[in-house]
Amino acid sequence: MTNPELLRGSGLPRFEAIDASQVEAHIPALIQDLGEQLSTLESTLQQRLSDNTPLSWDEVMTPLHHLGERLRWSWGVVSHLNGVCNSSELREAHAAQQPEVVRFSNRAGQSQVIHQALESLQRNPSHPLDSTQIRILDAELLSMRHRGVGLSGASQESFNEASEQLASLSTRFSNHVLDATQGWTLLVHEVDQLRGIPERALQALAAAAKDAGDLHRDGQDPTALEGPWRLGLDMPRYLPVLTHADNRNLRETVYRAQVSRASSGELDNTPLIEEILDLRTHQAARLGYQNWAERSLASKMADNVQAVEQLLEELRVAALPVAEQEIDELRDCARHHGATEADDFSPWDVSYWAEKLRQERFNLNQEELRPWFPLPQVLDGLFHLCERLFSIQIEAADGEAPIWHQDVRFFRVNDQEGQPLAAFYLDPFSRPASKRGGAWMDECLNRSRNSEGELTHPVAYLICNQTPPAGDVPSLMSFEEVETLFHEFGHGLQHMLTTVEHPQAAGINNVEWDAVELPSQFMENWCLDHQTLMGMARHWKTGEPLPEEDYNKLRNSRTFMQGCGTLRQVHFALTDLRLHSTWTTELGQSPDAFRRSIANNTTVLPPIPEDRFLCAFGHIFAGGYSAGYYSYKWAEVLSADAFAAFEEVGLDREADVQATGQRFRNTVLSLGGSQRPADVYKSFRGRTASTDALIRHSGLAAAGR
């Protein structure tokens, strides 16, 4: 091929033209070409440095960005497809090329010439740099330090080997979790075993059986009412069983399978965890840090490990007594129903009895609300909210862009005059065989302007894993799935509504990790705003609005089980932070045992012996959250305080809400990584954030009740 699709480097990718063979054939050529360009740039900069004359931004940062962007575009498409269209061929091609990608990144990040040029540009630029350029430069120099530019000889070789190992281990970890999740299924023939599980979920379980080639005993295809049903560990199949199955033994079976994923046999992540933690500890030491947490926080909003510990301890102290009371209330509910587990309460009983108590206390059945949240209407409600708050228009543009699966939709974002601002892909449904679990936003194209002044508009990938449509029935969303969609769209808004002209700080680029969740968690708050919710909650068959009493039940149940929910996040965050700040192999304690010691005062029900949660903790071992999982809570403080700005002007005062929304767009969504997050937030709020709103929203202020 004269111009392979994978190397195009600009515009929307033609996904259908990119496969494993392209990755194998063209990524090596790309890396070689980028290596040659990097050498040319180094020679040019070396000459300029020896001339001892001031360098310009366009001589150093612009060509560096172009090199990075070519790699980001091509390797980004490969990584994206690996997450949403996983196959054994693509996985092998990705794993085979990843070391070379890491090697090139290390070489660029460790270039002494480029480092000297950046320092020269920082000290004595040929033209004054603006505040955004200064911030980008500071971040780039810190990034180069973290990539080992200050090392030489054997220590740099060891550092580079460890970087490649870490990238490879992360990919293996992720693949093990995916394979373990896919690898466990349970075929059920007797409908009595599934009593309590809603029909909608039974349809999904029967569809999974059909996909697996299972047949009813009479030779017919599986059906929701007659079965058979194939249970699994992907969330759309797992959660309904854990939440609704009356059969306690069945709940226990799927729970034990879920918490022990990737902890035995060929897919055992246990040795990978120790290897990853050990390598990170050594990497941090090579860079002059005491531990990986210190290295992680050097580029974040939080000042140090102590500041994070303090925030988490405040939340732990507020949440623990509430969580203990919540579990006691669940036991009482079970006892009231004459259930034997009241005296032997176990983790697989929590979701089930929480749902029972929620129904009794608020007369609220989450499953029964799904018909009011069909995906098309939820999208309409989300888009209308964005139009209200941020003065934008969102319109479907299906067929105008290449897609990677028939489920995927494409949308355009315009200003109020209809001028284009951005676009996004939405891939909403679960596909356990080929798509990794969870939900995320990623960059397809970043906002940038070329030398001719032509603007590239940002394009986002928005990925969810919600319940797919079944037959004539659209995707009927749980309220939790609605919140997840709003969350990911918040990330998308920051990516798409940026006005920063320097791509290195546009959108989510150069935004500190613990501040990047602010827009996403902020958007979640609107799911319970009366105007927003009632505007989109209409029955998919009759078009009737959600009854007001159901809205009130949802609102009143907002803080239900928030003690346990908060404590769970604190447990994850503290485990992550301390694994990366105090755990070492010299402790003589496995990471699992170390996590269990933290659980002593961050859980009400201790983990069962088979609970090997760390083996599937992809956020910190396969994602970017190592020593950064606390970011969710850190940003939640910001997001709750930001939403409080709208509450203070009055959510029913349209002009004030729109003015506040415009201010949020012009600061948080617009300024991206061009300023420190604390300064951006102060520009919006007029002050620093307070934890008061989060504690109030979570119902933890009532801890002393």
Image: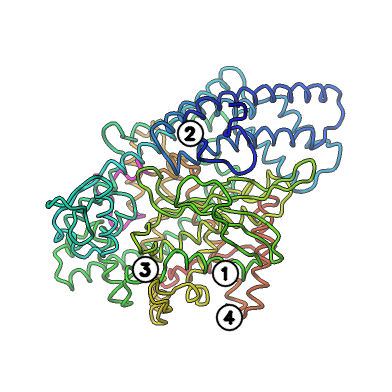
Circle 2 packing at 10 Å, graded few (<14), some (14-19), many (20+), is: some
Circle 4 packing at 10 Å, graded few (<14), some (14-19), many (20+), is: few
> Amino acid type of disc 1?
His
Q: Against 245, is 255 above or below?
A: above
**SS type, badge 4:** loop
Taking 6 as reference, is 364 left or right?
left
Circle 3 packing at 10 Å, graded few (<14), some (14-19), many (20+), is: many
Numbered badge on residue 652: 4
> Amino acid type of disc 3?
Arg
User: How far apart are the alpha carbons under marks 1 and 4?
Assistant: 16 Å
| Magenta span: chief secondary structure | loop
> Amino acid type of disc 4?
Asp
> Amino acid type of disc 2?
Asp
Q: Looking at the image, is mark 4 or mark 3 nearer the viewer?
A: 3
Q: Looking at the image, is mark 2 or mark 3 nearer the viewer?
A: 2
Numbered badge on residue 19: 2
Q: Looking at the image, is mark 2 or mark 4 nearer the viewer?
A: 2
Question: Where is residue 249 shown, x and y percent of the image?
Answer: 16, 55
Q: Residue at x 45, y 71 (%)?
A: 701
Taking 376 as reference, is 204 left or right?
left
**Label 3 sits on residue:** 370
The residue segment tinted magenta is: 601-616
- The tag earlier along the polypeptide, 2 or 1, is 2
